Amino acid sequence: MIEQDKRAEEIQERWRKWFDARKDWDVQAREDIDFYLGNHFTDAEAKELAERNQMGLPIDRLYAAIEQFKAIITSKPPKFSAVGREDSVQDWHRFGKQY
């Protein structure tokens, strides 16, 4: 039987490790993209939520909507002005000047 070179075995082992790591990364990246696109629940989880009469609306969608709402509300600071209905303040001002 032909002996295999130890360097070749080492290279093959490194390639297998890299390939396995690449597969794991690819699976994780696909799951991350699906999550980003709104596919948060598996079919079984979505079915269970439907049986419970619950919506499959992810929290991050609500959070983004609330943050956008807060940004719209606070985009311009509110301006409050206090205007007296009578001129009693002016009377007190004149009263203070007399003494």
Image (tube, rainbow, N blue to C red):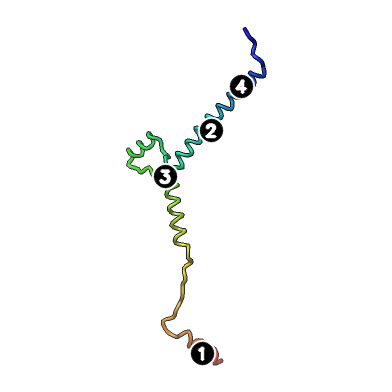
Name the residue tied to disc 4: 13
Badge 3 density bin: few <14, some 14–19, many ≥20, Cα 10 Å? few
User: Residue tagged by mark 1?
Assistant: 94
Whole-angstrom CA distance, mark 3 to mark 2, is 24 Å
Q: Which residue is mark 2?
A: 25
Of labels 4 and 1, earlier in sequence is 4
Identity of the residue drawn at 44% across and 54% down: 66
Q: Earlier in the sequence, mark 3 or mark 2?
A: 2
**Front tag of 1 and 3:** 3
- From the image, state whether disc 1 or disc 2 is nearer to you: 2
- Tell me the residue at 46%/68% (across/down): 78
* SS for dot 1: helix
* Few, some or many residues within 10 Å of mark 4 (<14, 14–19, 20+): few
Q: Which residue is mark 3?
A: 58
Q: Nearer the viewer, residue 17 or 49?
A: 17
Identified by mark 2, the residue type is Trp
Foreground pick, 65 / 14: 14
Residue 35 is labelled as none
Quadrant (top left/top right/bottom left/bottom right) for the C terminus? bottom right
SS type, badge 3: loop
Name the mark nearer the viewer: 4 or 1: 4
How far apart in space, not on screen, are marks 4 and 1 (Cα)? 95 Å
- Select label 3 or label 2 by which is in front: 2
* Cα distance in 3D space between marks 2 and 4: 18 Å
Chain-order first, disc 1 or disc 2: 2
Tag 1: amino acid: Arg
**As displayed, is residue 18 above or below residue 85?**
above
- Estimate the spatial distance between the alpha carbons at disc 1 and disc 3, rounded to whole Å: 63 Å
